[in-house]
Amino acid sequence: MPPVLIACPVTGDLVPTGETVASLEELEGEYLLIACSDCGRDHEWARAEAVIAAEYTD
Ligand SMILES: [Zn+2]
């Protein structure tokens, strides 16, 4: 399944959240936390902010 990305609020780049879903409706919970691989901080993010990686191919 494709990875879920969020835009890092520090760098603005898309970073993987570690979640993989077929559609964003499958995400559990309103807010989730990631250890950002881009800036190294922790970010709380909402499902509404997330995007599925468009370039993903199985
Ligand atoms: Zn970040």
Image (cartoon, grey):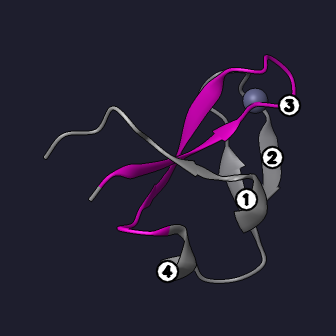
Q: Circles 4 and 3: CB distance less than 8 Å?
A: no
Q: Tell me if the residue at label 4 has its CB under 8 Å from ligand 1.
A: no
Residue shown at 68%/20% (left/top)?
Answer: 13
Q: Pointers 3 and 2 in contact (CB under 8 A)?
A: yes
Tag 2 residue: 43
Which structural element holds mark 4? helix
**Mark nearer the viewer, 2 or 4:** 4
- Which residue corresponds to mark 4? 26
Q: Position of residue 58 (x, y in %)?
A: 13, 47
Does any atom of ligand 1 lie closer than 8 Å to the CB of label 2? yes
Amino acid residing under circle 1: Leu
> Which disc number belongs to residue 33?
1
Q: Amino acid at mark 3?
A: Pro
Residue 43 location (% of width, % of height) = 80, 46
Which residue carries the number 3 mark? 9
Type of amino acid under label 4: Glu
Left or right of 8 in this view: 14: left
Disc nearer the start of the sequence (1/3) = 3
Residue at 79% over, 56% down: 45
The magenta segment: 2-23
What's the distance in space between the residues labelled 3 and 2, CA to CA? 8 Å
Pointer 4 local density, CA inside 10 Å: few below 14, some 14–19, many at least 20? few
In terms of secondary structure, where does tag 1 sit? strand
In the image, taking residue 27 as reference, residue 47 lies left or right, namely right
Q: Amino acid at mark 2?
A: His
**Quadrant of the displayed image that contains ligand 1:** top right
The alpha-carbon separation of the residues under discs 2 and 1 comes to 6 Å
- Does the magenta run of residues contain 10? yes
CA gap, disc 2 and disc 4: 20 Å
| Mark 3 sits near ligand 1, with its Cβ under 8 Å away | yes
Q: Position of residue 38 (x, y in %)?
A: 64, 22
Counting other residues with Cα less than 10 Å from the Cα at mark 2, is it few (<14), some (14-19), or many (20 or more)? some
